[in-house]
Image (tube, grey):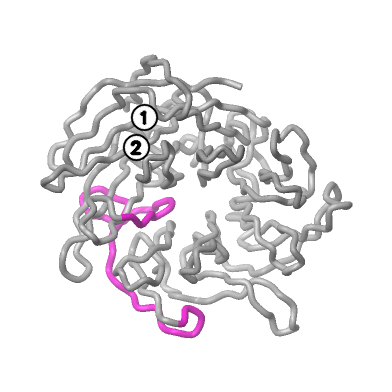
Amino acid sequence: MKMIQRMLCVAVALGVTGTMLFAQDAKPLFKMKKIDNKRYECFGVGDFNNDGHLDIVSGEYIYFGPDFEKKIRFREIESDIDENGNGYAWDFMDAPMDVDGDGLLDVVTLSWHGQSIEWLKNPGLDKLDSMWEISLVEKNGNFETGELCDIRGNGTEDCLIPNSQITTFYTLGKKEDGSTGLIRTLVCDRPMQFGAGCGDVNGDGRPDILRPNAWFEAPEDILTGKWIEHPLSLGGKDGKDDHTPQILVHDINKDGRNDLITSSAHGYGIFWYEQLEGKDQWKQHTIDDTWTQAHALCLADIDGDGELELIAGKRFRAHNGGDPGADQPQCLYCYKHAVAANGEVTWTRFTISYDEGVGSSMVICAVDLTGNGTLDLVMTSKSGGPIVFYNQTKVDMIDTILPPAKR
């Protein structure tokens, strides 16, 4: 287990976007544990054997908590990923869901190359180490990834938003044959940039769905009502739209209006979009544009101060070296923001990992794995994983210096 202790002490002026600082102290602090060296780009966290401990599913394997030393192989995945991280596995999401309502977590998966959503049935506690039965949900073009979201607004992430060109979501419900399964709701069939998110944009208390090209206002009945499309342009510089990873919703400047956070998934730039007064008025601000392929974003209160931090990681060999800055060192950063009396937002960047062979691929999960009340981080990538960063923010810190990533 490796201790991550990093401090950066450089200030960078970002012109009209304000100032970003590199960290002046060593928070947050993590211990890194590389659980395995499997080259997959997705994972999920859940209790698959109902023992009260969170487990990690990634690719063909489930790693059982609390120490993740025991693993089982429960499926076969087609893959051509080589030792350099080039290539792809036909697995772009591992979402824990009880699809059939039997009280056991199953795994919902999707694939770019297979162009399908499938689910794998948990066979029961005495057969976990067998090959799980796989069923097709739908074939519907290229799926880049997907995530569980709280579209119902009930505080539970029990709906699935796939990251595809059309805009859809899946909820658990009764199928025509009477069984419980995934039911698709179509929001918009117009092709859009890859990238998706969920959150209350207009403050009406209902979570909306966001894409790089538009946001969709949720109706009272999300299954039968009409989703209203609003203009939006996210992910590119100068207000242009681009392929994004997660689109996060949060009131950054504390003005009572929810703002947006996302990035260019394959280029330079992590941005936040200030929601202005008036309908569908946004102002783009740059958080950091010194590194590329920020293909996984997460909001979480890492240090327990009641404020959400932004976690961002670099995807390894996303397009097999074809993206700008693809050969930059892999990195994982935490960004804290502060709001001045005049409303100006300042971001401070903390290094969690730099040039240690740690990438984040499609998703970063912040979850309390140890039960100590602090959020740990889980991720994986084509450079090998899964990897856990155990939160040590309650531990005394020692400062060291690491230079920031450069173009």
**In the image: residue 45, left or right of residue 49:** left
| Quadrant the C terminus occupies | top left
Q: Which residue is mark 2?
A: 335
User: In the rendered structure, which disc, 1 or 2, sits on the residue that comes first in sequence?
Assistant: 2
| Picture layout, residue 319 above or below residue 221 | above
* Residue at the limit of the structure toward the right, as seen here: 126
Residue type pointed to by label 1? Phe
| Picture layout, residue 374 above or below residue 31 | below
**Quarter of the view holding residue 256:** bottom left
Can I make out residue 234 in this image? Answer: yes
Q: In front here: 25 or 6?
A: 25
| Picture layout, residue 178 above or below residue 147 | below
Can I make out residue 330 in this image? Answer: no
Judge the density around disc 1: few (<14), some (14-19), many (≥20) Cα neighbours within 10 Å.
Answer: many
Residue at the (34%, 53%) spot, across then down: 242
Residue at the (29%, 69%) spot, across then down: 202
Which SS type dominates the magenta stretch? Answer: loop
**In the image: residue 195, left or right of residue 251:** right
Residue type pointed to by label 2? Tyr
Q: Secondary structure at mark 1?
A: strand
Q: Which residue is mark 1?
A: 350
Magenta residues, as a range? 221-250
